[in-house]
Amino acid sequence: MTESPSRIVFRDPQQKLAARVSDLLGRLDLAEKIALLHQHQAAVPRLGVASFRTGTEALHGVAWLGVATAFPQAVGLASSWNPDLLRRVGAAVGTEVRAMHHRDPENVGLNVWAPVVNLLRDPRWGRNEEGYAEDPWLTGVLSTAYSNGLRGDDPRWLRTAPTLKHFLAYNNETDRCLTSSNLPPRVLHEYELPAFRPALAAGAAVAVMASYNLINGRPTHLSPLINDVLRGWAEDDVMVVGDAYAVQNLAGDQNLFEDHPAGFAAALRSGIDCVTEPGPLSEESFTTALRRGLITESDVDDAVRHILSVRVRLGEFNPEEDPYRETGPEVIDCPEHRALAREAARASVVLLANDGLLPLDPAATGRIAVIGPLGDTTLDDWYSGTPPYRRTLRDALAERAGADAVVFHEGADRVALRCAAGLLSADPEGGPLRIGGDEDTGLFDVLDWGEETFSLRAVVNGRSVGADGLGPEPHLLINDRPGPNGWEVRETFRLEPAGDGVALFHVQSGRYLLAGEDGLVRTAAARAQDATVFTVDLLVDGVAAAATVAAGADVVVLGLGNHPLVAGRETADRRDLALPGTQDDLLRAVQAANPRTVLALSSSYPYAIGHALDLLPAIVWSAHGGQEHGAALADVLFGSDPSGTVVDPAGRLTQTWYTDAGDLPDLLDYDIIATDATYLYYRGTPLFPFGHGLSYTSFRYENLRVSAAAIGLEGEVTVTVDVVNIGHRPGVETVQLYTRQQRSRVKQPLRRLRGHRQVSLKPGERSTVEFTLPAAELAFWDVTRSRWVIEEATHTIAVGRSSTDWRLTTTLRVDGERIPARSPFSPLHLIDNDGYAETTPVAVPDHPGEALRGDRSGAWAVFDQVDFGAGASRVRAVLSTPGEIVLRLDDPLSGPILATLGTPAATPVPPATGVHDLFVLYSTPDTTVTTITFDR
């Protein structure tokens, strides 16, 4: 007898979510449940359950699935500081995902992998463009807004299921599967975790992806934080997915387990519900793990419950109730989304510097020279959608000023490459390159993308040169590519000295070019000495030619920046903050030829461009802006859109721009407190500070007021300030609220963003901006008691235009706690130290806790203000590895020795009374200590 759909609980929308999930879970057999634990979840025909797939990329447009509206990169969207704009962009992207899913449900899933909330701690990170900010509060606000747009505004049903990436402390590509992010407890709780919490707590995001790296020596896919912390933030079940092939790493590159069943089982027990691995491997591994007793069916049920919770909320089992069921393909690239793409691109542009040259007057500017490799192109990153059209800077300026008023030069060298057998020649039809040909087919433009890496574009057809296959085996060179593109970029080369000329190294294959007897050129030589030797004939000096064009113009717009897929991208960090390749030479030559030069910098990350600030009258920056990139830049440069509506630069930086890479700590050092990193702790003078961005008008701040001079632990204050447009144009001001705790037991941030408001004001117009500041937001993590604390202290309250441009300040007294001295008679966990040198936090084997390893003899950690009272009689230490430590009081070098501990790790101690700083010195390298405990 067939069961009536109305009596099937999991299909009944009137039933509670938990009941529906439990009902469906109970109907699945074990094999069917195991088949749900990976990305491509098989259908269950007997229950009428369709297949399901996770992982539609939707970072700033729908990626990899055909034409879709292309919005600015995520760091560009964030530069708007406009949560409502991000919500609307998220809604547009989510709507297009829905339309594509309805068109092709088998291949387009509704679980979207966005947004990325990893903090932009270090601007050298190869995936910098994917994140929002270096500040956790701002990241939380913006990611919640974007997630809300993706999920839709129906309180019950999801448009899509947003997934936060990548949990946790993932900020380097260098050895990303092997490196461990060092997170002392304060950095973990005050910096990393707060970026992930808001979107989950608000119900905006419903899933999380674990990251490739380790944290304090433990892979994130095994982190107890997943179950113990992350899942506690959300009201509903949270689905946690593994990153691509990351679970395989546990028994692979990370070498933690003997085989995949053991690794997959450990991940499942740790809270990974859905692995992104090949289906057969996943099912075989989980099945074997069950047979061995490494996991139970209850473990499988927990994971499946989280997955089904998301699927039920997507309306899969109630299509008639789904409010998004009618979304059709007409929404893709619709006029509304085109307009939104331009609005978003315009709002992301940041005016970094301006001596009055901007805004340009399209009617009076005269001849405009557009110069540079980004002057007449728009570029996509790995997670970009396929834009339906592209508006370049050159095109947009010509539309506004007239085609005859705009001239262009890319600034690229034009060369010929010769070997002993003849000229390297391109095929006009895009076929294989060969040796031999005429000058018409033997010309190539060299596009230098930095770090000695360049692409070659054949002049004969305007297409780029690349290999026709992947990997180290020989592949023909062909010239049919639009430029560097794809996950495996096959269109980049480097020059290496060889013989009397150079060898061309093909980056992707790791091979050198070799011309065969058939005249065709292949990636066939393993060594430079075995490669074909070329000489490079420079036919056009790109820098000199561009300078000549610039000299004949009334104003120059210099389009510089990076290629998002070369020399700084996923899998590759940047080595420094320098402009790519010859771009610095181009900047200097163009400025010398025409001082009226505006730098329009389009990039995925900050650059150290202090020389440009010294040389040029105006600089604007934006991330790669998608299909409307050039039009948006033109609107900002002219200060108006084509209709004459005033446009004011509204973008503000969401990360610090440093003067030099030397201002940064080691890329792999995540302890922002100890290293004075990010705007929170940086003590130097940045090139451009967090929150910076100029306007075409001026604003005055007046009448800063706080509703109370002092508050208690449960209190809050209202902060108000008047902002007046004192200029002659309408403008947009982003009013920023910061605090600084003046005295504390611990090192406090120099400044911390607590709120922002964006106001649009006409000349002479005044607005009163209001913020609410609860005392709870002033809490920090107390390592002495492993909990949040609001300390008794006075706080500076500041409002201004950036993190260093405070216009008005006042103070607020908080009647909070005084942190007591530590007791040595409870375990002192080494991970909870107050300071350290030459140590590394590590995982305790077979335990969720963490320990501290001394990396060399002389390493140390300190516990401040330890109250020994009337004295201790004995001390015990838990050492995870053999070694020796010495305990000293008050000074690591000259303080009295309290004890020396090794094996056994317990000993009597001489009398020590009162309050002291306790130093733990590591006598032997690689000694790992978990706790120290004193007995009375």
Image (spheres, helix red, strand yellow):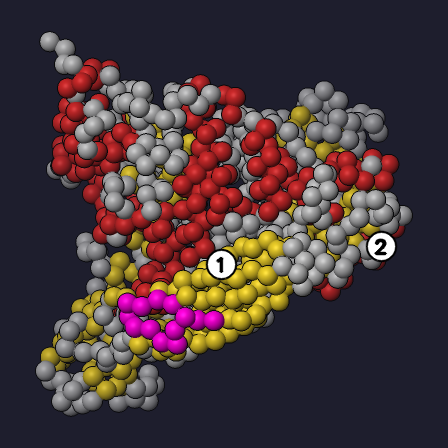
Which quadrant is home to the C terminus? Answer: bottom left
Mark 2, Cα crowd under 10 Å, few <14 / some 14-19 / many 20+, is: many
In reply to whether residue 712 is colored magenta, the answer given is: yes
Amino acid of disc 2: Asn
Which quadrant is home to the N terminus? Answer: top left
SS type, badge 1:
strand
Q: Nearer the viewer, residue 175 or 545?
A: 545
* Span of residues in magenta: 705-717
- 153 vs 465, left or right, is left
- Identify the residue at horizontal 15%, vertical 19% (top origin): 7
Task: Give me the C-alpha separation between circle 1 and circle 2.
Answer: 39 Å
Image spot of residue 618 (x, y percent): 73, 57
Is 748 above or below relative to 609? below
SS type, badge 2:
loop
- Identify the residue at horizontal 39%, vertical 60% (top origin): 191
In the picture of the structure, the residue carrying the numbered disc 2 is 594
Q: Nearer the viewer, residue 836 or 867?
A: 867
Q: Residue furthest top?
A: 1
In the picture of the structure, the residue carrying the numbered disc 1 is 756
- Identify the residue at horizontal 45%, vertical 49% (top origin): 142
The answer to which quarter of the image holds residue 193 is bottom left
Image spot of residue 685 (x, y percent): 58, 70
* Tag in front: 1 or 2: 1
Image spot of residue 196 (x, y percent): 36, 51
